[in-house]
Structure formats: structure tokens, C-alpha cells
Image: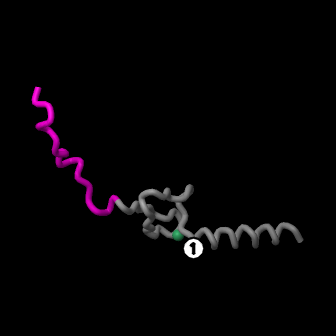
Amino acid sequence: MTYGSNHALPESELQPINCLYAQWTCLVCGGMEEIASDEEAPVPPICPSCHRLAVAEALAALRGVRR
Ligand SMILES: [Zn+2]
């Protein structure tokens, strides 16, 4: 056994710098969003501006139903 001689990581373990950030795509507008890799993309993946729009639309719909 060559214990200790295989200390270096294999090349496949080397990650590009973007491992600090994760990317996800908004379902609504298709926009690319970046988050820190220790955060998680929202589920469903909808960016803040589309989310605000969806909330506004939902509220408007609610108001429309309750006359
Ligand atoms: Zn969006």
C-alpha cells in the first residue's frame, strides 16, 4: 500500500470559482438569477420581481372576487 502518497485531489474535484454562487432560472420571465451557494433557489423558482407581480395579481384577483 502507498499510504499517504495519493494526497492531491484528482482533477475532477477541482471546481471553477462559480462554486461560490448558484444559478437558477426564473420560471416566469426566464431571467437568470444568482444566489450564494449556501442559499437555496426559491421553490417554485420565481425571481423577486415576478413574485411581487404574482402577489399583486393574486391580490387583485381576490379583490375582484370579493365585491
Ligand atoms: Zn422572473
**Farthest top residue?**
1
Which image quadrant is residue 49 in?
Answer: bottom right
Closest to the observer, 57 or 9: 9
Closest to the observer, 33 or 26: 33
Let me know if residue 6 is in the magenta part: yes
Query: In this picture, is 16 found above or below 12?
Result: below
Q: Please provide the residue range marked out in magenta.
A: 1-19
Tag count = 1
Q: Quadrant of the N terminus?
A: top left
Q: Quadrant of the C terminus?
A: bottom right
Let me know if residue 60 is in the magenta part: no
Query: In this picture, is 25 found above or below 1?
Result: below
Q: Amino acid at mark 1?
A: Ser
At horizontal 70% and vertical 73% (from top left) the residue drawn is: 56
**Farthest front residue?**
4
Name the side, left or right, on which 42 lies relative to 8. right
Judging by the rendered image, the residue that carries numbered circle 1 is 49
Label 1: element kind: helix
At horizontal 63% and vertical 73% (from top left) the residue drawn is: 53
